Amino acid sequence: MTSNINPNNINGAYPVAGQDNNSQGFRDNFTNTSTNFQYAANEITDLQNKVILSAQLTGGNALTAQNNMQNSPLINALISDFAAQAVILGPQSGSITINYASGHYQTLTTAGSVSLAFTNWPIAGQAGLITLQITVTSPSYTITFPSAVSVNTNGIQGLNTSTNVMTFSASGVFTFTFVTSNGGTTISINETNKQLQPFNASADAVATTAACSLATATSTFSTAGTATLAAGVNGQIKTLIQTASASMIVTVANPGWGGAGTVTLGSAGTTATLQYLNANWYKIAGAGTTA
């Protein structure tokens, strides 16, 4: 805007020294000075109410209110050293609402199973993005996403797209990004993790009486004895291999074949490949083993 202050309507050469001066000149200067002061006061107040500040003005609004852009555009900006507000929610269980207005990066730690909801997304036509880091403290805990999380869901390990319930094969830190451009009517989900286990090329060596890891693709045995395999996540594949001339009996949770629920690897080179589907382990391949 152009300022209304006019420094040229004040006669700086009036009054003239050493002679009588018309009083109208005094009145004109006083009037114009007063008018310019009023213009200055109005324009300064307008700036104080609207400008973005690096520090709070004396007697002014707190920066959280002062620097609220109120959905005004910031165009053609070159920025550096830019940070997003981090919201640390801490241990959580039950129904948890993620408030977009609180910050674009939020974290939580599972103290039980969690059912998520989102609120205060930008209006339709504007894209909103939240990165959520979840520390899963136990694979027994699940995360339920709201039904609006329906875009880009295929292929996310552990996510049942019919229920939006996500299970985890192991404890760990998992990070997801949620994006919407229609006010939260539909939300896309993206994994920002590396490729997750147990689909990595990974194996664990299991001693007698120990549990087979759900975070590896393969468990190997080199002794006789017993071991256990807990319930997995839907679609998970697990291979068991005996490398020694010894008999290892693995007790499997939720066996799809019924009976005692054991897999016997009786000698070196015997194997069993299992897949977890619909809350049951099924033997899909193997050499020399009995189930």
Image (spheres, grey):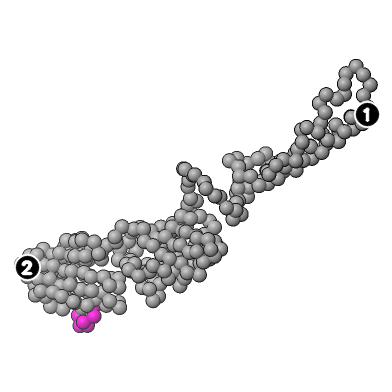
Amino acid at dot 2? Ala
Span colored in magenta: 254-260
With 161 as the anchor, is 228 left or right in this view? left
Look at the numbered discs 1 and 2 and tell me whether their residues touch, using CB distance below 8 Å: no
Quadrant position of residue 176? bottom left
Circle number at residue 23: 1
Quadrant position of residue 214? bottom left
Mark 2 burial class by Cα count in 10 Å: few <14, some 14-19, many 20+? some
Amino acid at dot 1? Ser
Residue 21 at x, y = what percent? Answer: 92, 24
Give the mark nearer the N terminus: 1 vs 2. Answer: 1
Q: What secondary structure is found at the residue carrying circle 2? A: loop
Q: The N terminus appears in which quarter of the rendering?
A: top right
Residue 147 located within the stretch drawn in magenta: no
Q: Is residue 115 visible?
A: no
Disc 1 to disc 2, how far (Cα)?
118 Å
Q: Residue visible at 60% across and 51% down?
A: 69
Q: Residue visible at 51% across and 66% down?
A: 182
**On the image, numbered disc 2 is attached to which residue?**
268
Q: What secondary structure is found at the residue carrying circle 1? A: helix
